[in-house]
Structure formats: C-alpha cells, structure tokens
Amino acid sequence: MLHNFHTHTYRCKHAEGDVEDYCRVAVEQGMSTLGFTDHTALPDDRWVSLRMYYAELPEYSRAIDQARIDFPSLRLLKGMECEYIPEFHSFYQDELLGEFQFDYLIGGAHFFPDPGVDEGASEDVDRWLNTYGGTNTSTMLRAYSDYVIDMMRTGLFDFIAHPDLFGNCYLEWDSDTTACSRDILSAAEELNVGLEINALGLRKIAYKKADNPYPMYPWRPFWEEATDFDVEVIINSDAHRPVDVQARMTEAFEIQQDLDLSLMTPESIGNRNAN
C-alpha cells in the first residue's frame, strides 16, 4: 500500500504523534503519498475535546508545509476530516480550501443533527447527536443518511469517511440499514463522491470487548449493497498513531477486491489547487 489519505495528529486529543512522526514511518514503509486529515477545527470551538482549537489551525497548516520540505520523497497532502456545519460553509470554502490552501476535505459524520430538535429552537439547545450510540433506531438512521447526503451535496468533500459508521451501535442488518445504505450509495453515485472503506474499524473489531455485540465497521453488508451502484471507494488506515499508517489496509483491500468495487485513483485526491 503506497497511499493513505486519512491521517490524524496529536491535536485531536485522541491520536499520537505529529506530522513529521507519521512522515518518518511512511518513508520507512516505502509509501509515496500521505494525506493529513485531522479532525477539523471549527470557528466556535465546538466539540473541542475531540479536535484542535481554531487557534491551532495555522500551526497545523505550517507543520504540513514544513514536512513537504523535510520529506521530499513523499507526496504530502493537506486536508481535514469535517462534519459539515451549514453556518460555517464559508469557513470550509474560503479559509480551509482558500486561505490555507488545503488540498482536500473529507466528510466524517461523527455527529449528525437531532431530528427531534426544531431548527427554530433556542441557541443553547444541542441540535447534534453523537453517531457513536446515536444511530440505533430507524428514525436516527434516516437522520444520519440525510446528513451524509447533505454533506455530499455541498461539493466540498472528495470522499466520505466510514459511511457505514452506524454499525457501531446497530445490532443487526435489516430493512432500515438497507434503506439507509442505499440512499447514501445512490447519492454517492449521483454526485460522484467517493466512499471510504476504513481500516480503523478493522482494528477496533480486533480488540473490541466480548460483551460488545455491535458489528462495528466496515460493515460488509453495506459494501455488498454498493455492488448495485456505480461508486468508487478508497481504502485508508485512518491512522491515529504513526505505526498505523498502513495498519489493516490489506484486509480492507480484500473487501474491495472480493466485491469487485471500483477504486478511486490516488491522483484524483487533492488536485483542487493544482492549477
């Protein structure tokens, strides 16, 4: 595996190492491309226990710029893994992709809007649910898939990270998970947005506790549904430690190969600022 387009740093507070640490391991392992996509800072510093502060954004950008000088054998891409907050659209477009010249953004629905909260509710009402534990009913699956589709429709994101993340808290594959999946897959086909088979989920499966009954992700039935659609997939390690820049990617590729799913080309990622 020569490429990984989903890499975090210590700034998200649940990963280890900085840009140079991941680059060093990537070079040792003979990789050619490494894309950094830490959990995005947000202008209001929401969810900051799981991501960098907004004030850290310039330093994160500089760290990647410096690594491009220090590791010339690597193609290094500057990115972010983002929830889409509609009121911050200009932040993604004008600051990340514009001012800071990020090469690409990926959509990651770790949170999604609570369908039970009216949009006109007061500002102190939390309108967002955590996908870890939140997608456990048909209503919540619908809200999750609607949000993922809304992200794709923005045109901001090269691919959607772990679209089958709902497997972390939904016990069995049923008609509701099928509908959720097919809605996401249909939109990905229509909008030409890639979907990620995420190897971090395979690492989680390997060490999850015996009393955890959930299937986690990648959830194979999701990818079996994908065979009905003209979609492209990308395989990433979702590295949160330097040692994991390629971890479990072989098994993720086996899912893609077993199901004969089309792969995104490495060259299709990160070309927004090529001209």
Image: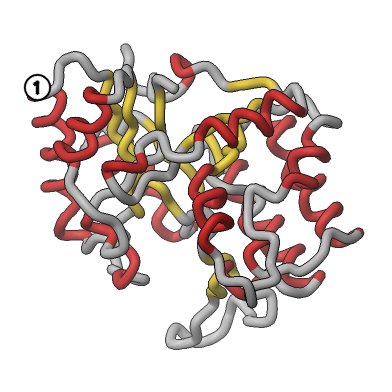
Query: Residue placed at 58% from the left, 57% from the top?
Result: 205
Q: Position of residue 122 (x, y in %)?
A: 49, 87
**Corner quadrant of residue 231:** top right
* Color theme of the render: secondary structure
Q: Residue at x 33, y 38 (%)?
A: 79
Most foreground residue, 210 or 274:
210
Q: Nearer the viewer, residue 155 or 222?
A: 222
Q: Is residue 156 visible?
A: no
Numbered circles on residues, count: 1
Q: Answer with left or right where residue 260 lies relative to residue 97.
A: right
Tell me the residue at 11%/47% (across/down). Answer: 59
Q: Which residue is mark 1?
A: 69
- The quadrant of the picture occupied by the N terminus is top left
Q: Quadrant of residue 173?
A: bottom right
Which residue type carries mark 1? Ile
Percent of width and height locating residue 197: 59, 39
Position of residue 213 in the picture relative to residue 94 (left or right):
right
Split into 4 quadrants, where in the image is the C terminus? top left
Measured along the vertical axis of the image, is residue 243 above or below residue 262? below
